Image (tube, coloured by chain):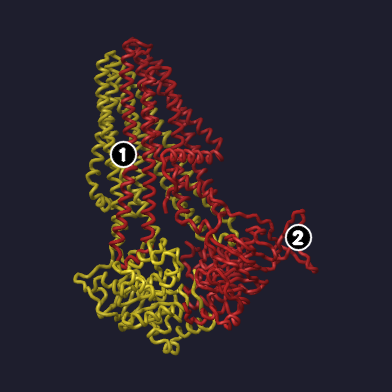
Chain colours: A red, B yellow
Amino acid sequence: MTRMPKGKVTMSGDIKRQFKVVARVLSYMLKNYKFAFLVVVICIIGQTLCTLQGMLFTQRLIDDFIAPMVTNGSTDFGPLANALLQMAFYYGLGIIFAYAHQRIMVNVGQGTMRKLREDLFSHMETLPIKYFDTHAHGDIMSVYTNDVDTLRQLMSQSIPNFINSSFTMISTYISLLVLDIPLTIVTACMTGVMLYTMTKLSAKSGKYFYNQQKDLGKVNGFIEEMMDGQKVVKVFCHEEKAIEDFKALNEELRSSSEEANKIANIMMPINNNLGNISYVLCAIVGGILALGGYTGLTLGKLVSFLSLNRNATQPVGQMSQQMNFIVMATAGAERIFALLDEKSEVDNGYVTLVNAKEDKDGNITETKERTGIWAWKHPHHDGTLTYKKLEGDIVFDDVDFGYDDKKMVLHNIKMYATPGQKIAFVGSTGAGKTTITNLINRFYDIQDGKIRYDGININKIKKDDLRRSLGMVLQDTHLFTGTVMDNIRYGRLDATDAECIAAAKLANAHGFIKRLPEGYDTLITADGANLSQGQRQLLAIARAAVADPPVLILDEATSSIDTRTETLVQEGMDCLMIGRTSFVIAHRLSTVKNADCIMVLENGRIIERGTHDDLIAQKGRYYQLYTGNKIGE
Amino acid sequence: MIKTLLAQVKQYKKATILTPIFTALEVFMEVMIPFVTAEIIDKGIEAGDMDQVYLYGGIMIVLAFLSLVFGILAGKYASTASTGFACNLRDGMYENIQKFSFSNIDKYSTAGLVTRMTTDVTNVQNAFQMCIRIAVRSPLTLICSLSMALVISLDLSFIFFIGMVVLGVALIIIMGSTTKIFNKAFEQYDAVNADVQENVTGIRVVKAFVREKSETEKFRKSVTKLYNMFCKAEKILAFNSPIMMMVIYGSMIAISWFGAHEVVSGSLTTGELTSMFSYVMNILMSLMMLSMIFVMLSMSLASARRITEVLKEKPDLTDPLMPVTEVKDGSIEFDHVSFAYKHGTGEYTLKDLTFSIQSGETIGIVGGTGSGKSSLVSLISRLYDVSSGRVLVGGLDVREYDMEVLRAQVAVVLQKNVLFSGTILDNLRWGDENASEEECIEACKLACADEFIQKFPDKYNTWIEQGGTNVSGGQRQRLCIARALLKKPKVLILDDSTSAVDTATDAKIRDAFKNKIPNTTKIIIAQRVTSVMDADRIIVLKDGELNGFGSHSELVKTNPIYAEMYETQTKGGGDFDEGGE
């Protein structure tokens, strides 16, 4: 549950890594908004220059206009009015630049966030199932919200601010150099001290922020676990122990976040006051120089210099403020890029699925319209194409599989299903039933052996086409936000309303849908929370029915629905299986009884196979399962 | 609400009070500094008097040093106070949640509680730090700068007031129009979130139906909507700083103009004019800060409300004044019991139930989804209180017992049961902290868990992942049963706790119960008829009412619901292997 990337926290490595991440964010932003960002940079520079110009005017105001008037006793305000008009012009220009920069940045910032979210999503959709198995769902979701949000601050404030601050600093230094060189050196020394303190402090606070996020992750994980099991805690009267454990973690979080915040908080006063000291130093050194007449420094120049001195030190303070945000944003950015860098599902398939027509001689030709007949379109090296009719013939040839290379879950699986056959898998939990079905549609790739579909190695079939030819009804029926109709149509997007209703009738779902307040237009919310488990399953069957696939994979539900709905589900599934090659993870007698072949799985091996009667006669494991007799352990 | 929250400051009161004090001192120093700067220029440099430069330079360094010290102290105490406050808030919520009854727990989702204790607390922590630090700083800077400006020149200060009014009005207009859009945008934000969640949890369906492209398209639409809303709001916000600049620069020019007149007429010095310029900045900047704080506060208000909700939630079950601390035996009696989850709605989950169970009996409970099976058993260990009637355990109303004693004697294996991260032994000892390893093994043997535990390389020291994800459903259920057995309860309730265990093992467990703990009353809820068939008596529930109560052979003959269930499950419709994941 930790929210931060793993790895050692070394100071220099940390800064280097953060720099890389910021650079990547920047390049991501530039990819789509090169021109806009260029305009923004120009605007920022323009704004800075105008502000500077205005400041200089203010200085000249006293020296060039007011002071002479005081000494001359003149009351002609004409020149002053002119000067002020000029000043107003520069300020006005600055304001326009400021608005333009802010306005364009809205689109750049929000646009980049939108692009990031879209890229994240479309990339996520290509990731292998394994990714979702191994990552907490809450973590994935927080990438889209928390982490993308932190980038907003980075893009719309920190980066422009950095540009602004550094440019202010550079231009101020140029003006300072023009005014007086020795004093500039004094100021530069102080700025150096400030920069040094700032980097030291932000490196330190970065480390503490890292710890804070880590501790926050721990607390988060603990709360999640305990809240999930809160009822168990109550039933076992375990409250005190739960509080004790929590307090320890909470205290750790408090102390690390206290440290982190402390440094962030004191950064500002330190910088400000170093700036003040710099001011005094300049005033004293400048005073000595000007009064002693050692250099060409005049009093007027010194006054100008002193006010510019502020400009030279303030940006350092602003930058240090932004550092805090950057440290936090990089943590989020790293998680975003980690997701974007995940490897997509590999698909080297080139055999595709097409609608087909069959003439009298059994020749297959490709057509555009839906005919109810499909064919595999198989391009060859020599550029020729062959078509093979989709039949639903599936063969497992000595298949081995493991979720990781170390531990095999399935061993030497050999089996075949001829078109229209019904194959049932039975066996205890963890025996590998679901795993086998997940190999057919290539949710996972096998380590050894071959799976052939109508004689074609499934590795050669494009994944999308392979999956389109297989219908699935999972035990966990996931429904999507939208109407009931939308959810049925999920099976085939171009299905008409009539086809969807026909599918619902076939699946036995029509009855309950009719009774819903708004029938087929009833909105389904939050994964179908407003429907019962059984109703959700009926919808999932209808969804598969509308897809009308030649091959079916069904995972029968276990016992959590009541008998009446169960009968409906059962009938729905039976209707769906007619005339299709079906693989069923079976929990019911009726299913296995009329299966063409039953595979009994144990520890990833097929230990028995045959029809119901065969297996009963064998009096083996199946017989034990069936009769509920005790198994000698 | 504020009061409830502030009560959690507790031991950090000192730091909380010191922060604004030091901040105030820091601000005073900061305000003094431009004053001194003016003196350096006026009396020192312009007058060509180096001694004055040293004098005021010295003063300024002292001030800067003091400001630094106060600033650091303020920052340090602010951090201590705000993080301590956050820590107390989390503690407070957590402790209160531990006092929650089941109906309190039902009100909140896990995700909701996690957000409250993390994100919401962080929001409030930041707002709190803002309040004690910047909320003091800005008005103070405002007041000090303003009064200094007034001291320097009454006339020129008038310009400030005009600037402030203009800025204030502009800010109000901007805030007003953006808040509404932002509120809508946050709703869309939830929708985007829901899209992601749907796809993450339903990824297998998405992939199985090859819907990656259409889902991405759907998501793109939803994100574009969000983009448009945020852009709309931020476009208005983009006026913020130009307007501020306009006001500041306008004031500057105005001050230059009128200031120049005053300087010429001799009622103002040039140094004072320079100081006025810095005060313009200070005043308008602090106004800006105040408006930012206002936004931050209003954003954290929602968080604060959600935290207070948890802190104020009153557990609705309380121990009696003179609790009974011993449960005599495992007999159970329901006396005209009705029960509704929501009081006063009249939607009764259980209606007028009356029956009695003798100590040591094995009772099966069957019925359709929503017939009230789980509700019925949760009344026995007083996880909820009845709406009317009485539930008696060991001859006494459950409300007369000390809750801890009652729950120790009435062990429930919940339908949604969880294991916690830790070793198997750690998990088992939830039932009895002082159980020896032998006792644990004994309990596991009873629950048929020992057989698979022995096959693990680390046996009883095997580490269980959060939620018990590294053991199968059937194994998890058996561990949960063993954990409950370690309590050595007088009543043992299994709420659909063997649904993932295969029929044979299920039978074996029931056999063990019968022989090894004959005096414990056993109540078994099940969907499978085979799990309850050999119970002494079976309760058939329908829509919260008692539909039948008798032995298997009686019910098959007399109760149509039970008979149908038996029929469908054994003759072609039932399940026979173990239910899988």
Q: Nearer the viewer, residue A270 or A110?
A: A270
Give the percent coordinates (x, y) of residue A557: 51, 72
C-alpha distance separating marks 2 and 1: 75 Å
Task: Give the chain letter at badge 1.
Answer: B
Q: Secondary structure at mark 1?
A: helix
- Residue pointed to by mark 2: A386
The three-letter amino acid code for the residue at tag 2 is Thr
Give the percent coordinates (x, y) of residue A526: 47, 61
Residue located 26% across and 33% down the image: B69
Residue located 47% across and 50% down the image: A143
Residue located 24% across and 34% down the image: B25
- Left or right of B401? Residue A136 is right
Identify the image quadrant of residue B344: bottom left
Q: Which mark is residue B134?
A: 1
- Residue most toward the left? B322
- Left or right of A325? Residue A109 is right
Image position of A375 with respect to B64: above or below: below
Q: Secondary structure at mark 2?
A: strand
Give the percent coordinates (x, y) of residue A257: 33, 46
Give the percent coordinates (x, y) of residue A2: 41, 51
- Left or right of A351? Residue A7 is left
Identify the image quadrant of residue B281: top left
The three-letter amino acid code for the residue at tag 1 is Ile
- Residue most toward the right? A361
Image position of B236 with respect to A129: above or below: above
Task: Give the chain letter at badge 2.
Answer: A
- Residue most toward the front? B457
Work out whether residue B348 can be spotted.
Answer: no
Are the residues at dot 2 and dot 1 in contact (C-beta closer than 8 Å)?
Answer: no
Identify the image quadrant of residue B421: bottom left
Q: Nearer the viewer, residue A603 or A93?
A: A603
